Image (cartoon, rainbow, N blue to C red):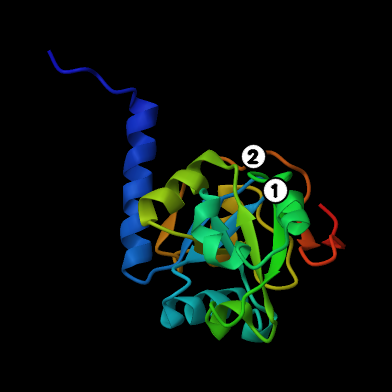
Amino acid sequence: MPEQQDPIVQSRHLSIASAVRVLAAGGVIAHPTESVWGLACDPFNPEAVSRLVKLKNRPLEKGLILVSGDAADFGGLLHNLTGDQRARIDATWPGPVTWLVPHFDQIPPWVSGVHHSVALRHTAHPFTAALTRAFGGAIVSTSANPTGCQPARHKFQVLRYFGNELDFVGGGNTGGRSSPSEIRDAASGRIVRAG
């Protein structure tokens, strides 16, 4: 007799598969993170990134965060760091700390903006980590809100902000943190945004 799969687990797998199909087709999705909902797309699809920043009304020059459930997705960027810098990062990952690391032109300008560094986070959120693994790499992830508005902490807020303009909205709840991810500079260890 075939083994019965837990309906919740099965639903999560179907949601991940749906989200991956949308990302691969150049769509924009909303997904939960450790503290708020995020808007996400394929970082190497300039049309998808352009659509995401237009939805958010965010200047492209500001740059975006890359998120993955596997730090190995950032390997080429992390190899350029010193042992001390890498140790600082490893002490906080996976988790809600985003690190600014030099990109040495390995990242497209529509992701890095005008900066010589790129923002990276190894997420601990189960859905988002599983999503990036199924997608096969990091995704762009920025808070799900129009610029100047409060970040969405619940799915209904995402829908209120964006209605049917997104191609997928799902993945369960946020991790329950009260503040957005902390942002630190890998070169100095300086906190750029408190979390």
- Identify which amino acid the numbered label 1 is placed on: Pro
Q: Is 3 drawn above or below residue 69 in the view shown?
A: above
Residue identifier under label 1: 96
* Of the pair 49 and 70, the residue shown nearer to us: 70
Q: Nearer the viewer, mark 1 or mark 2?
A: 1
Is mark 1 in CB contact (under 8 Å) with mark 2?
yes
Residue type at mark 2? Gly
Nearer to us in this view, 154 or 30? 30
Q: Residue at x 45, y 82 (%)?
A: 46
Which residue of the protein is positioned furthest toward the front in this rendering? 83
Distance from the alpha carbon under mark 1 to that under mark 2: 10 Å
What SS does tag 2 mark?
loop
- Farthest residue to the top: give it: 1
Q: Residue at x 69, y 47 (%)?
A: 90
Q: Quadrant of residue 177?
A: top right
Residue 25, percent from left and from top? 31, 69
Q: Is residue 55 left or right of residue 178?
A: left
The residue identified by callout 2 is 175
Residue furthest toward the left?
1
Q: Is residue 95 left or right of residue 38?
A: right
Residue 180 seen by the camera: no
Question: Which image quarter: residue 85?
Answer: bottom right
- Dot 1: what SS? loop
